[in-house]
Amino acid sequence: MDSNTLFNVKGKVILITGGGKGIGRMISEGFVSSGCKVYISSRSAADCDAAAASLNALASSLSSGGSAFSIPADLSREDECKRLAAALAAREEKLHVLVHNSGAAWGEPFDSFPDSAWGKVLTLNLQRVFTLTQRLMPLLEAAAVKGEGEVVVDPARIINIGSIDALRVPVVENFAYSASKAGLHHLSRHLAVALGPRGVTCNTIACGPFPSRMLKPLMDSFGEQMVEGSPLGRIGQPQDVAGTCLFLSSRAGAFVNGATIALDGGISLLARL
């Protein structure tokens, strides 16, 4: 038992939704740099293609053996989830790690918060996580490694990117977003129990503030307060979320199932008087 073995993910096949920008891009870079074969999917073909090209250049410079591929899909649509799963199955026999990162947010005061926002946010952030997972189960099950007595020693992994807004009541009025992420956290626990016997674990990373396009309006308005409100005096960095995903995907994280990891530097622990 050594660190090189415990935390090694080299050669694993990864699918990251929303992997072309923001937190998803940070995670993609972590896996490619560690020698994984990473598929990136989101609605924007330009974002996916640009991210794959950039990541392949990085892998070449590092000689990591990693690689990145673009499979654009509108993940809010059931038929597109089916198409993505079929496209991946045509290329791969196994999927070791599925990272659900694609998401939508909507901020608006209570009195004017539109009904349409609920359908948009809940569909992408919650319902389609289930849809895509369901469609990819054959590839995930095929990736589970069994040891003596047919016991799974290295399961396939599902990692759901949640939010600390699901652990506390957020300052901003993002009612549908916080509710969808709370639902995602519990869906992760439900899937952990349902899919564990099939050789697949499911965990959630409840992210605090990280530099991303989604967070930019808040950072522009409340950036100093966010930093001052963090016990560590900073917001998240790419290594933080990439490292957490690498741990969960490695042998070191093989027995973690149904967990919600608050990746926020302790921000969610602070009460606002």
Image (tube, grey):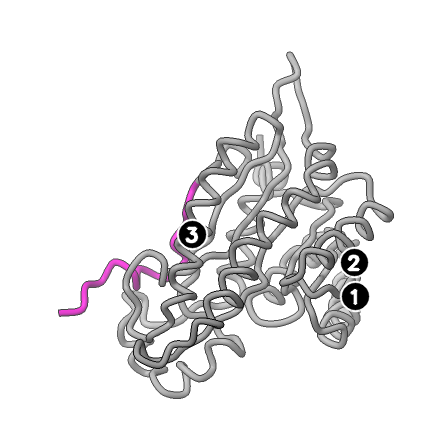
Residue type, mark 1 in image: Asn
Element at badge 3? helix
The label shown at residue 56 is 1
The label shown at residue 183 is 3
Split into 4 quadrants, where in the image is the C terminus? bottom left
Quarter residue 7 falls in: top right
Q: Residues within 10 Å of mark 3 (few under 14, many from 20)?
A: some
Does residue 206 sit above or below 20 in this rendering? above
Q: Residues within 10 Å of mark 1 (few under 14, many from 20)?
A: many
Q: Which residues are magenta?
A: 259-273
Point out the residue furthest to the front here: 115
Q: Are marks 1 and 2 in contact (CB under 8 Å)?
A: yes
Residue type, mark 3 in image: Gly
Point out the residue furthest to the left here: 273
Element at badge 1? helix
Question: Does the magenta segment cover residue 158?
Answer: no
The x and y percentages for residue 175 are 36, 68
Q: Mark 3 or mark 2, which is nearer the start of the sequence? A: 2
Tell me what residue is drawn at x 36 percent, y 63 percent. Answer: 165
Mark 3 or 1: the one toward you: 3
Tell me what residue is drawn at x 57 percent, y 60 percent. Answer: 101
Point out the residue furthest to the right here: 90
The x and y percentages for residue 57 are 79, 69
